Amino acid sequence: MALAGAGADVTLAARSKEALEETARLAASGGRALVAPTDVSSYPEVEALVQRTIRELGRLDIVVNNSGVAKVAPLVEMTPEDWRFMLDVNLTGVFNGCRAAAPHLIAQKSGKVINVASVLGQVGLPGYTVYGATKGGIIALTRTLGVEWARHNIQVNAIAPGWFATDMTNEAFADPAINQRLTRDIPARRIGRAEEIGPLAVYLASASSDFMTGQTLFLDGGHSAA
């Protein structure tokens, strides 16, 4: 929504066509919004997403890798299938997005890649071992790819949100005990609002961040600094 509001044409990709269409209706007020149901864990689907974006919108300038899933449980209760599920979406999905976009961004010698990591890729929290590992992988991928693609004038950075009010976290924060337990680790003593992420994404997608690459910006109310 923030990128559309800043004037970008956007391709919206997720598994839920209904949710995509709802977002597209809102985003279309700022420009064109293309709906492209995609499983980011499938490289052929992500490659088709990139090709369709270029074909229908004309070019590709910004890639936002923000799909994520989580299962919360002690490691001893995790199955190999749980590991593979989170790894395939959270980390392989980011690789797929970067790899599918690579030939186009390198050929035009410009581009912005924004990966969404997490504060849990930096700090430990019981129950999030696998999730944290995937998000830590995104931080490392971002750092190294930023160095690798700098000579192509492509900036690769990551946003690492802390606790935010989202569909994924609403149930947890509705429990007073869980809410208190998690917010006590946040110096700001509150969780984030979705609209606080958008402006940072717009900055990372703009020319204002042309001299920044390989960085992970923590938007977490001070959680990672405490």
Image (spheres, rainbow, N blue to C red):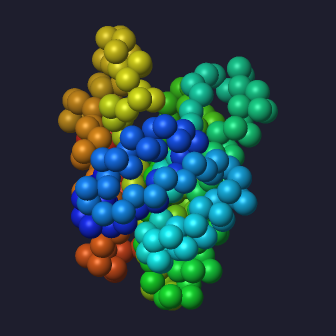
> For the view shown, which residue lies furthest in the right direction?
80
* Residue name at image x 61 percent, y 22 percent: 73
| Figure quadrant of residue 185 | top left
Looking at this view, is 57 or 44 the one in front?
Answer: 57
**x and y, in percent, of residue 187 in the image:** 24, 35
Residue 184 visible in the picture: yes
Q: Is residue 74 above or below residue 34?
A: above
Q: Is residue 78 above or below residue 134?
A: above
* Residue name at image x 40 percent, y 58 percent: 33
**Residue 208 relative to residue 24: left or right:** left
Looking at this view, is 141 or 62 the one in front?
Answer: 62
**Residue 59 relative to residue 101: left or right:** left
* Residue name at image x 28 percent, y 32 percent: 191
**x and y, in percent, of residue 111 in the image:** 45, 77
Q: Is residue 97 above or below residue 72?
A: below
> For the view shown, which residue lies furthest in the left direction?
188
* Residue name at image x 57 percent, y 48 percent: 37
Looking at this view, is 206 or 77 the one in front?
Answer: 206
**Residue 51 relative to residue 19: left or right:** right
| Figure quadrant of residue 118 | top left
Residue 161 visible in the picture: no
Q: Quadrant of the C terminus?
A: top left
Looking at this view, is 97 or 82 the one in front?
Answer: 97
**x and y, in percent, of residue 138 in the image:** 55, 55
Q: How many marks?
A: 0
**x and y, in percent, of residue 67 in the image:** 53, 47
| Figure quadrant of residue 171 | top left
Q: Is residue 48 above or below residue 168?
A: below
